[in-house]
Amino acid sequence: MSTGMTHIRKANNFDIIRIIFAWLVIVSHSYVLIGNKGCDPLCEWTDHYINLSYFGVKGFITISGFLIFKSLERSPNVLDYLWKRVLRIYPGLIIVLLLSVGMAYIIYQPKQTYFKFEKEAVSYILNNLTLYHNQWRIHGVFDKNVNTAINGSLWTMGFEFFFYLVLLFLFPFRQFKWLVISILILTILGLLYGNIFHIASLKHINFKLRVDFIVELGFFFLIGSFWAALDWNSIPYRTQLAILALISSIVIIYFKLNPIWLGFSWPYLVLYIGQGSSRLADWIHNNIEDPSYGIYLYAFPVQQLIIYCFQPSVMFLLWSSTIISFILGIASWKLIEKKMLRFKNLFVFGTR
């Protein structure tokens, strides 16, 4: 999942925790994709109440809301804001789709019907590039896997870009800080109400994206944006609030309350840790930089290929896919994503 970071910044812990969040998704998928009816350790411990990927995805979306709002504040015009969003998402996505189709071609089973493969392969790329009309499979590829999707992780891309567009409604008002904060608070409360009282019915609304997911993920995204709208350094008792947020998260999980209440504690913890610094953060920033988006994009097809070739145990799948996905994620950042960011200022004109 993209995080919208397109500007030069000092080293902080965001790179570390984004990598951890990507890995949490790998851990959860290692159990689900095997199909042994098991689930990750947190899922087992909470009796299927919540899993590690929940914290990974919600952590990603929170950081995205925080950083994209900051980008909106800096953008001199709407075109610059949208261009940077496209530039951050699409180069890595295009390459992973092309490589996935190449992989699919090699393992495609019905060798006598390549015309059908080529038709589905083209539609696979084009449909997934829209972000809103995902095509999960190509028939003849991973047919014997428990999950036949080539890259199930792409489901978050459409929601992410949708939230980028939602933030544009704040663009004309961004100079009026308290108006923006008030709009965010009211919207967050509206999303909370929807999550608590209408989440079951919202999934039946006919829309390009599942409305229940918009309401759930949007809650975390806009809470990240809310914290970005505040002057973080002027918030009193930040450490005490972090301790309270940690305790609250533990209580919510222990008593298995509605997970949506984690929106008031987990995002704060993520942002509190993310804006800190450490020696590891310095090393990652100077060497590995920002591979989390690539790790997230490649992990699912890598895991599917390992399952197809080896019928692995959970632990073999987990660690082999971790190593390969991390290598591909670093390569994606170094060779594609970072190089494309040279064009990020193409539409920088005008003043705020």
Image (spheres, rainbow, N blue to C red):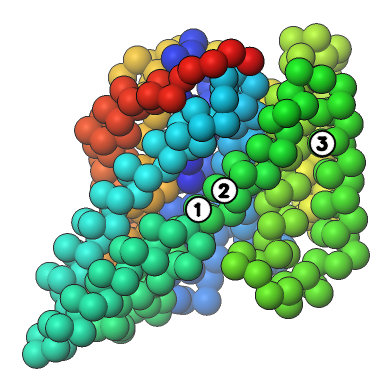
Q: Nearer the viewer, residue 282 or 177?
A: 177
Residue 85 in the image: state x and y as whole percent.
48, 37
Q: Viewer-proximal residue, 88 or 198?
A: 88
- 14 relative to 34 in the view: left or right: right
Residue to which mark 2 is pinned: 160
Report x, y in % for residue 94: 30, 51
Q: Which mark is residue 273?
A: none
Name the mark on residue 157.
1
Disc 1 crowd rating (10 Å Cα; few below 14, some 14-19, many 20+) is: many
Label located before the other in sequence (3 or 2):
2
Q: Residue furthest left?
A: 112
The answer to whether one can see residue 57 in this image is no
Residue located farthest toward the front when viewing the structure as drawn: 350
Which residue type carries mark 1? Met
The residue that appears at 45% across and 67% down in the rendered structure is 134
Quarter residue 287 falls in: top left
Label 2 crowding class (10 Å Cα cut-off): few <14, some 14-19, many 20+? many
Residue depicted at 26% across the width and 43% down the height: 328
Disc 3 target residue = 184
Verify CB contact (< 8 Å) between mark 1 and mark 2: yes
Q: Residue at x 15, y 83 (%)?
A: 115
237 is higher (above) or lower (below) than 317: above
For the residues labelled 3 and 2, the Cα–Cα distance comes to 17 Å
- Residue kind at label 3, given as amino acid type: Leu
Residue 333 percent location from the top left of the image: 31, 33
